[in-house]
Image (cartoon, rainbow, N blue to C red):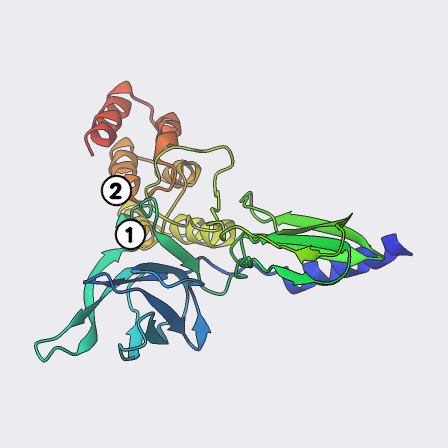
Amino acid sequence: MKTLLTTCLLFCFLQVFSQQQPPAPYSAQIFAEQGERFWVIINGVKQNLDPQTNVLVQGLRAPNYKMKIIFEDNNLPELDQNLFFQDPGEYIYNIKRNKEGKYVIRANSFVPIAQIMPPPPGQTVIVYGAPAPVGQTTVTTTTPGGVVQQTTTTTTTGGIPGDNISMGMSVGGVNAGVNINVNGMTGNSTYTETTTTTTTVGGTTSMTTTTGAPVQQQIIYVPGYGGPIGCPIPMDPGAFANAKNSITNASFESTKQDMAKNIIGNNCFTSAQVRELLTLFDFESTKLEIAKFAYPRTYDRGNYFMVNDVFDFDSSRSELSEFTGGY
């Protein structure tokens, strides 16, 4: 009976998440110029659990959102801002005082998606719409008794919607965790671990539950890869297949080249995907030009050596290596 119920729950879960969403093209970085700590609220949902001076919200898909800033200092006013996105990339906003001394939010700069660098260590990164990590609290009580019951619950949440999906269920007291990998992408699974300890202490009952800080999650799009990252989220296989078909259906090499550059300029690719794109072209010079153009928009730059396989001449391989080495 337990096995049947678990299977049914898993089937329903897979049905709900069977259609993967395309990579989210927008992100918003909000920072306070003078170091004030704040919470970010987007469309009514709090993004960061603890107040920060710099928050990066990734995974934004819609072209506009409503944002509210609430300061840790209650004496500072709340700020409202409409976020408008057009080109894929990272939009950076500055919280500052204007000439009248009032706090305002100003658009600071924009980084195209192909030029986004990995966030620096210590950066607070939030994935919009992803399950929020459960924070932890410490509670100590002293009451007459003689029995101490200590319960510790720790939950970590991993994965981005549409990439890596995790599910936990309890059937008849049995906890089950399921990690679903989509399109070769991996991430941290979600689990809940509960430990209960009962101890007798003469005359005093003390309960203490301690939990650590939430853990920042990381999604790995190329399993086993740990080298430099050139762009944040590579093209998913379905969209990539459509892009290849569009290029293949073009009649002339020059048309294919223009179409490929347009697609590459607005997306992120893995080295393996770039290699597949190059096989669609006939001329060595075209392959080399596209390979150079695609390098800055490649997720796993450390694997770019595999692109050399499509060239017929050593001179082309040497020229590409020289280009990537000096980029």
Give the amino acid at mark 2.
Phe
Count of numbered circles in the view: 2
Residue 49 location (% of width, % of height): 45, 63
10 Å neighbourhood of mark 1: few (<14), some, or many (≥20)? some
Above or below, 267 against 130 in this view is: above
Give the amino acid at mark 1.
Gly
As drawn, which residue projects farthest toward the front?
203
From the viewer's perspective, tell me whether residue 143 is left or right of residue 298.
right
Comparing 210 with 119, the one in front is: 210
Residue 265 shows which numbered tag?
A: 1
Residue 166 location (% of width, % of height): 63, 53
| SS category of the residue bearing label 1 | helix
For residue 255, say whether it is visible: no
| Residue hosting label 2 | 293
| SS category of the residue bearing label 2 | helix
From the viewer's perspective, tell me whether residue 168 is left or right of residue 164.
right
Residue 75 location (% of width, % of height): 27, 78
Residue 41 location (% of width, % of height): 39, 72
From the viewer's perspective, tell me whether residue 277 is left or right of residue 135.
left
Q: What whole-number distance in Å separates the C-alpha atoms at marks 2 and 1?
A: 8 Å
Residue displayed at 39% across by 41% down: 277
Comparing 122 with 200, the one in front is: 200
As drawn, which residue projects farthest toward the left?
99
